[in-house]
Image (cartoon, rainbow, N blue to C red):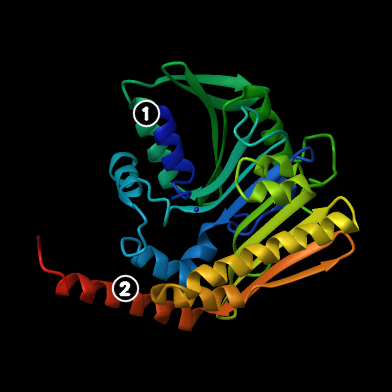
Amino acid sequence: MKTALTAAALGILATLVTAPAVAGPLRPERVGADAEWVVHVDVEALTRSAIGRFVLEHAGDLGIDMSEIEKVRGELGIDPRTDVFSVTAYGPTAAGEDDGVIVAVTNGNADEAMARVMAMPEIRAELLDVDGYPVHALTDEDETMYVHLRPDGDRRILVAGDDRESLLRALRVLDGRAGDAKKAAVITRPPGSGSIVFAAVRDADLLEEFEPASDIARLSEMVTIDVGESDGALFALAAITAGNEQDSRDVAQVVQGLIALGRLVAGQEPDLEPLRELASALQVTAEGSQIRVQFEYDTRPLIEAMKESFEAAEHEEERTPDP
């Protein structure tokens, strides 16, 4: 069962899996050089984009449960949609291990949120000095999260992790004290303009639990994904590095097969016709050991198509008699 500490931390840091120094865009210098994976969410880009605003306004129609965000806002006084500007998570080993850290840029409401978490009766809070850094150890039952919160002009930078040594390494990276000027090798290309979600994995074995992505992961050495909106168009890019040219061709064939299957399924259901059009916008190219899957689609007609779908569903519901 998720403990109160875990729930509170998720609320403070992101609640985005359902989001001074310039916040928003990924800053590679804030990612440890030994990172094997990184995920960055630019919440500011999300709320500026037409597709992001539409998703937030029509979350219910899209089947997105916003109750946890509302609960966090009520209990902690912080709204991840407006008070969190960016969230970066990274780690040197598989996602889910204890050595991953989160670096979030927020506004001053993070101070009140932290105070409320520390005041929770089920939380045991202890202030530690970790190599000169003030770190809060927040323990709930047998789980401990280490949190460092600092001002950055009128904003705040929050760094959190389950392992104290990993947190210390992240703080040293943040302050340029890591002793290694190298940038994270996992970030081979910067996010595009308007990027909302950026993810890169150097050890693609992390994807093996997801079918049919495991077939792709088995042949891949690195995967980078970038999704956002730029110049009125929604874009997505998946860049895959295979072990050799033959593996590259095999991966490209797998991806093309998945796209063809998606078009076939969508073509059999009238309600899914817009998805078939979106699938047709996907382009797959392979050159050497590199595979690129690209997508670009004007945001306005996409939003209009979704609105029409919502209206049709509402009219169908009105015509359906109550049992």
Write the residue at 50% across / 64% down.
Answer: 46
Q: In which quadrant of the rendered image does the C terminus lie?
A: bottom left
Q: Residue at x 28, y 77 (%)?
A: 312
Residue type at numbered disc 1: Ala
Q: Secondary structure at mark 2?
A: helix
Quick check: 59 above or below 275? above
Q: Is the C-beta separation of discs 1 and 2 under 8 Å?
A: no
Label 1 vs label 2, nearer the camera: 2
| Image spot of residue 60 (x, y percent) | 31, 61
Q: Quickly name the residue at label 2.
A: 310
Residue 260 versus residue 43: which sits nearer the camera? 260
Residue 208: x and y in percent read 66, 42
What residue do we see at 55% from left, 45% from top? 104
Q: Secondary structure at mark 1?
A: helix
Res. 97 in view: yes
Q: Nearer the viewer, residue 11 or 217?
A: 217
Q: Quadrant of residue 81?
A: bottom left
